[in-house]
Amino acid sequence: MSDKPKGDSEVITKTRQVTQKPRLYKVLLHNDDYTTMEFVVWLLMTVFHLDLQKSQEVMLKIHRSGMGIAGVYTKEVAETKVAKSIEFARQHEFPLECSMEPE
């Protein structure tokens, strides 16, 4: 007969969760022939909280190349920024388009 208690031979394992960083999305503003440069700068300062100099740089990039990155965010924040940008543009009667894509 064995003096060894039953069940002592089990191994206790800990599972460790690995947290992944959320995927980031670029918010893109698209050039058009009607939206003023001043409005785009104002939008970048208001919605994306860029300073005047950075807003002007992004606006010129959009103007020259047809599209520019307004910011990079998590999916939910990017969706909100896109919706808010389009809403502001429509309120001011501009056809500015804004989209997002994975980084």
Image (tube, rainbow, N blue to C red):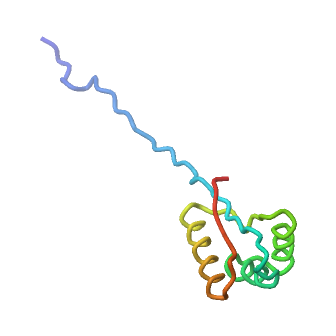
The one nearer the camera, 99 or 33, is 33
Q: In this view, does 65 lie above or below 3?
A: below
Residue at the far top in the pictured view = 1
Residue found 62% across the figure and 83% down from its top: 90
Q: Position of residue 8 (x, y in %)?
A: 25, 26
Task: Name the outermost residue toward the left.
Answer: 1
**Residue at position x 69%, y 75% in the image:** 96
Among the 4 quarters of the image, the one containing residue 5:
top left
Does 55 appear above or below 77? below
Residue at position x 77%, y 70% from top?
Answer: 31
> Extreme front residue here?
33
Q: Where is residue 43 in the image (x, y as percent from the top left)?
A: 72, 81
- Quadrant for residue 22, please give it: bottom right
Instruction: Judge from the rendering whether residue 18 lies leftward or rightward of residue 46; answer left or right.
Output: left
Q: Which residue is drawn at 34% across and 32% down?
A: 12
Q: Could you say which is closer to the camera, residue 85 or residue 63?
A: 63
Kindly indicate the quadrant of the structure image that contains residue 63. bottom right
